[in-house]
Image: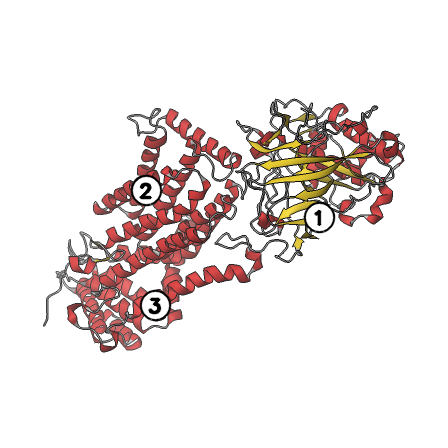
Amino acid sequence: MGRRRDARPGRRSAATYRFDFLGGCRVSGRIGIALASWAATLLASASLLPLVDRSVWLVQAAILLGLTAGAGAAARRVPLARPLTAGAQLITGVLLLTLLFAREEAFLWFLPSPDAVRELGTLIGNGVGDVGRFTSPAPLTDGIALLLVGGVLLVGLLVDTFAVTYRLAAPAGLPLLALYSVAAGLSDGGAGALWFALAGAGYLVLLLAESRDRLAQWGRVFGGPARGGFAPRESVGTPTAPMRSGRRIGAVALGLALVVPLVLPSLGAGLLGGTGPGPGGGSGGGTISAVNPLVSLQNSLNQPENREVLKYRTNAADTDDLYLRIVSLDEFDGTSWKPASRNVSEVPERLPPPPGLAAEVPFTEVSTNISAAGWYAQDWLPMPYPATRVEVPGDWRFEQVNRTLVGDGAQNTRGVQYSVDSLLVRPGAEQLSVADSAAAAPTLPDEFSSVPDSLPAVVERTARQVTRGADNDYERAVRLQDWFAQEGGFTYDTQVRAGSDSEAIARFLRDKEGFCIHFSFAMASMARTLGMPSRVAVGFTPGTAKSSGEMSVGLRDAHAWPELFFEGIGWTRFEPTPNRGSVPEYTRPDVPDSEVDDPEQPEESASDAPSTRPSDNPECPRAERALGECGSEEPDAGAAAGSGGPPWGTLLGTAGGLLLLAAVVLAPLLWRRRVRGLRLTPVGGGAGPRGVPPLAAWQELTDTAWDHGIPPDEALTPRRAAGRLVELADPGPEAAEAVHRLAGAVEQELYAPRPVPVAGLAEDVERFRAALHARASRPTRLRALLLPRSAIRVTWAASDRWERLRERGRA
């Protein structure tokens, strides 16, 4: 008869619970899956390492993850219900975070007090601010450390809950994917192939651990011969079918993850965060695609430290007009200002003459030697406008219309030293007053003059009121500038909600509060309604003179300003933002001449004193944004790398949406597994204290057959129903015997005066389920797993409850 099996349900021998974890230590089933989930979370968390300059947070996260996993193991040992187990782990995580980050304010160092909760909230707020303030790698402040450790702990809790508590390893990949996505987004492409490979390896280890445990429960070691020494001849020396299938699935999944982002341009850089080819494509051609530069400066306006972005020496005695321009936003569609899509080419030895500049307009050519900070990674090269010659190492491309240089591929400004020859154009008021900006409109691209239909009428109406009585375009431009900067009652306020759409411009004109983005967008839009071509430039003000003779440009010097085109003069800067930058000399009565000194010994220039208010700092994209591969991400004028990547709110919202979608998709599967667990769990009533109630086991068996395409027939007796199931399913002798044995237990439960407890009912149900699963087709198995037909019972139960409620209401 063979060895007698343990009849107690839920009990298995220690041998059937053991497997090799990572090819080494021998551990039991759930402990092995818990260790695998711990390892998978840490491997996925490694993708966050490039974001900060120290890795001690990962050690802290590993320790806290281990403690929360231990709390989960203890809760399951009690045992607690699955939701209570997850709740116990969540409480443990909160206590550990309190101990690590707010122990001075907590009761007994780890019990959250009101002061501890406030401290944690403050740290979270500081951390969110630091994320937008610092470049990668950022310093490991307490706020950033709390966000990192807390985020990893939350993801680890979700992975442990899915994989260990609910025994669903596959959905546990979603939190891991969310963790990697946050890392890829914040690092702006820095989460490369290595980090993706580590995250993927962790997920595969988790799947392997769960698969081995499931197979071990059926008396077989994953990837080895059958127990008892018997092995089919064809399996000798070759992996078993599950092992071969696992390898194939892993290879196909990794192949798709690597190949699909390359063949689908809409995915941008893909999961690996690669930059792809640069705008020149290596051949000197290509295009800069339009990106959405809603230049959000507020993340950089209240920085506690004005980190140096650039330093330069120049032979210009007066640096007031030496603005360092990065990019211009010339296309306004009513939703946002952005650069238009244009061709790029090799950087010529001598740049072409600036458009619209006549020979009779006075100008001085100056030389400037610029050094970018080692942490400052910007795709566009900051330089004075208009540049006539640029000497810069690396791979750069030239966009002629706006006279900008953009890095090709991974090229950026990090630590670059370069020299620029540029013109300081000094038009006189008389020259500007006779220049006709409207006459230049036909010779310029349409994007410089187009006015979207969505622009509110108040913009043009206000522009005409402000410029009423002006004789020419120059006077209109000066009146607009002075109205914004002095006469209109506007207030410089960095706390106002940013925006570049038509409604934001109208709201700014109504509330009269904003910062440089609002002023420049509003003036450029109003100028277009008056027929004057305009655009918005993003870059830096001249900076502050140092005792060494150098000029220092910091994050707070980031700025945006409007430029208007005048025929014979070219693009001309105006300054409508109060208390920012310098008002152009050609808008004043007297225009002094500039002097040129030796570039090796520049004089200290009298620039404006630094404002007590923090200055504007547009967000900085990397090279993908120059190619238009980053969708709606904005170019950063100031702290390009400091606030690169999507905002935390967007990333967390995307991750939350993915988790919500997964919950909806997996709801039938989770409900079905929960019901199966309840039905096959031994209880004190029914068939005895150590057995499974026969009626519950019978319902589970019929629902299992239903999920596999055999609907129940409740009009039949248990014996007739069992015969029908065996005839339709053809499960094999052993499973058929299990079905008849369960039917006999049900008849005894229903009709015997004193029912005798029957052991092994849960095993009989599982035996029949395994036989159905083995004989079913792959679509049938998938349907039974993800969309079980028996889940309709939820709808029936809800309908019955609703009818009862209606009857009570009528009564």
Sequence-earlier tag: 1 or 2: 2
Left/right placement of residue 167 relative to residue 137 reads left
Q: Position of residue 326 (x, y in %)?
A: 66, 40
Callout 2 amino acid: Ala
Q: Position of residue 462 (x, y in %)?
A: 79, 33
Q: Which mark is residue 33?
A: none
Q: Quadrant of residue 778?
A: bottom left
Q: Secondary structure at mark 1?
A: loop
Left/right placement of residue 54 relative to residue 725 reads right
Front-lying residue, 89 or 129: 129
Q: Position of residue 725 (x, y in %)?
A: 28, 73
Left/right placement of residue 122 relative to residue 13 reads right
Sequence-earlier tag: 2 or 3: 2
Q: Is residue 246 visible?
A: yes
In this figure, which residue is indicated by the disc labeled 1? 349
Callout 3 amino acid: Ser
Q: CA distance from mark 1 to mark 3?
A: 59 Å
- Dots 2 and 3: beta carbons under 8 Å? no
Q: CA distance from mark 2 to mark 3?
A: 32 Å
Q: Which mark is residue 62?
A: 2
Q: Residue at x 41, y 49 (%)?
A: 175
Work out which quarter of the rendered image holds the N terminus and state it: bottom left
Q: CA distance from mark 1 to mark 2?
A: 54 Å
In this figure, which residue is indicated by the disc labeled 3? 245
- Dots 1 and 3: beta carbons under 8 Å? no
